[in-house]
Amino acid sequence: MLQVSHEERSLQDLMELIRDFVKERGWERYHKPESLAVSASIEIGELLELFQWLEDEEIEGYLKDEEFRSKLSSEMADVMIYMLRLADVTGINPTDAILSKMKSNEKKYPSDEWHSRIPSKTKKHQ
């Protein structure tokens, strides 16, 4: 298994770590794009469950609680693991994908038009 300190880990290092973990267990045959996308969606549901029915003030309080933060961190990691594995299996460089999407978002939502506004697919301004 890849041994790298926290400070030195790149997305590629993490993808390799995940790839090795999967390979060591013989799970490659289960890691098809659709299965990984479904699994990521399930994990997103578990992440959302942590916030279900909470008011903003309650969330602020929970974010100061180490046990809640640990659960949140774990669910976020699950989502990211599946997304990085999906990127690896499909040959999509996650860094390139994010940079490309952010460039697209800059054009779609110019700051001078969208500052302090909620993004919407149906209307440009309110």
Image: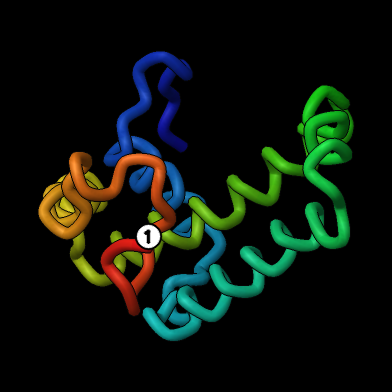
Q: Which amino acid type corresponds to the residue marked 1 in the rendered image?
A: Pro
Describe residue 63's horizontal placement relative to residue 78 as left or right: right
- Residue 3 falls in image quadrant: top left
Residue closest to the far front? 126
Please say whether residue 93 is visible from this viewpoint: no
Left or right side of 81 for 103: left
Residue sitting at 46 percent across and 37 percent down?
A: 1
Read off the residue under disc 1: 119
Which is nearer the eye, 108 or 29?
A: 108
25 in relation to 122, above or below: above
Residue under the point 50% across and 68% down: 26
Element on which disc 1 rests:
loop
Counting from the top left corner in percent of width and height, residue 36 is at 47, 74
Instruction: Please identify the residue farthest to the bottom as the structure is shown.
Output: 34
Quarter holding residue 99: top left
Q: Residue at x 22, y 41 (%)?
A: 111
| Pointer 1 local density, CA inside 10 Å: few below 14, some 14–19, many at least 20 | few
Residue 77 at x, y = what percent?
59, 46
Instruction: Indicate the position of residue 105 as horizontal and vertical percent values.
Output: 20, 54
